[in-house]
Image: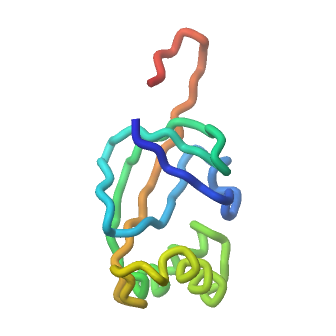
Amino acid sequence: MDRIDFDENWNNKLLGDVFSTIRPGTKKYNLQGRYAIYLKDRFFCYADIIAIDKFTLDEIMERKIHLTDTGRTDKDFLELIESFYGKKTWWKDGETQLYVLYFKKIVQTSLFDQLP
């Protein structure tokens, strides 16, 4: 099973049933794929991708997607995303292609539920 890692629980988004993450447009993600979610290298939950959007960094900023994803102001979000990816060969400033992945958390309701 593929895994998605979070260094921080930005905006406490992982506590909700549905959450998003902004990731490089260079990797492939599977719609309806199940992923193991890790926070600070510790297992957090399983989640299914329920939607995938692809935007440029500028479009993410214009649509204010970063506000609900990270809880950061425009300036702080730009500094954060550049610290993650700014030195990558595929980085093109505002024209950088990024995915917004939307996950639905898988909740185990009993000991007999079959999870991956």
Q: Residue at x 47, y 82 (%)?
A: 87
Residue 53 position within the rendered picture, expressed as x and y whole percent measured from the top left: 34, 65
Indicate the quadrant where residue 71 lies: bottom right
> How many numbered marks appear?
0
In the displayed structure image, the side of residue 88 where residue 54 appears, left or right: left
Residue 86 position within the rendered picture, expressed as x and y whole percent measured from the top left: 48, 83
Of 95 and 87, nearer the camera is 87
Residue 77 position within the rendered picture, expressed as x and y whole percent measured from the top left: 60, 81
Of 96 and 69, nearer the camera is 96
Q: Residue at x 62, y 38 (%)?
A: 43
Q: Residue at x 34, y 77 (%)?
A: 97
Residue 63 position within the rendered picture, expressed as x and y whole percent measured from the top left: 46, 81
Indicate the quadrant where residue 116 lies: top left
Q: How is the image coloured?
A: rainbow
Quarter of the image with the N terminus is: top left
Q: Farthest residue toward the top?
A: 112
Indicate the quadrant where residue 110 lies: top right
In the displayed structure image, the side of residue 108 where residue 29 appears, left or right: left
In the displayed structure image, the side of residue 34 where residue 77 appears, left or right: right
Above or below 101: residue 68: below
